[in-house]
Amino acid sequence: MKRSTFIANAAVWGVISAICVVFLAWSASVGGDFGDNIALLTMAVFAKPVGAFSIAALLTTSLVHKFDLKLGHGMRIAWRVLGVVPAVAFMLSPFMIPVLPSGAATAFAVVLLAAMAIPVLFLLFGLFYGLSLAGEKPDEDEEDDAE
């Protein structure tokens, strides 16, 4: 992983983690009573899963950088898809469920309910995203050509 990639990811995930932790602490001190404020209610739903994702992504990115992990191109793409697709589906679900037909909306509803019931899943998604940032292992054909 390039140093600039590591620094950018560490900064972004660090800031997002801090915002989620501060919001959750503030929410607990207020007692979670947000009244009719839609923005705070939305943040209350998103804070735990997004916080879990960002903390796992931050830790995994740090470990991948420290140990200079290398993965094949296909594996990196697979980890990125496994990490990003469920997270994006979760973020879009409150907006997509009302406008999609019932069959398509079911997938978004399942992701939303799973995230609220089991926020630990987002630790895995963050781990998958962090693994996708590993350096690319050279192909065996390229190694043979170099010799």
Image: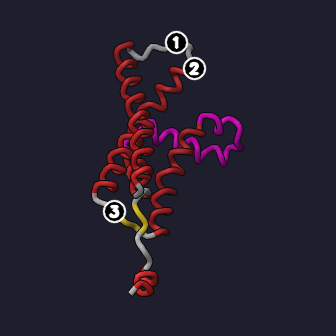
Highlighted magenta segment, given as a residue range:
94-120
Q: Residues within 10 Å of mark 3 (few under 14, many from 20)?
A: some
Picture coordinates of residue 132, whole percent (x, y): 44, 58
- At a point 65% along the width and 39% down the height, the residue shown is 96
> Which residue lies under the disc numbered 1?
35
Mark 2 and mark 3: Cα distance apart in space? 42 Å
Question: Is residue 85 something that shows in the picture?
Answer: yes
- Would you name the residue on which mark 2 appears? 38
* Between discs 2 and 3, the one toward the N terminus: 2
Lower sequence index among marks 1 and 3: 1
Relative horizontal placement of residue 83, taking residue 106 as reference (left or right)? left
Q: Quadrant of the C terminus?
A: bottom left
Residue at 41% from the left image edge and 39% from the top image edge: 11
Q: Do the residues labelled 2 and 1 touch (CB within 8 Å)?
A: no
Is residue 47 positioned above or below 87 on the image? above
Looking at numbered disc 2 in the image, what kind of residue is underneath it?
Answer: Ile
Amino acid residing under circle 3: Leu
Q: Where is residue 41 in the image (x, y as percent from the top left)?
A: 52, 22
* Residue 107 on the magenta span: yes
Disc 2 and disc 3 in contact, CB within 8 angstroms: no
Q: Is the magenta stretch mostly helix, strand or loop?
A: helix
Q: What element carries label 3?
A: loop
Q: How far apart are marks 2 and 1 (CA)?
A: 9 Å
**To which quarter of the image does residue 27 belong?**
top left
Per the image, label 1 sits on a secondary structure element best described as: loop
- Pointer 2 local density, CA inside 10 Å: few below 14, some 14–19, many at least 20: few
Judge by depth and name the residue closer to the eye, 41 or 8.
8
Farthest residue in the left direction? 67
Q: Name the secondary structure under disc 2.
A: helix
Q: Which residue in the protein does label 3 denote?
A: 69
Callout 1: 10 Å neighbours few (<14), some, many (20+)? few
Q: Residue at x 66, y 48 (%)?
A: 103
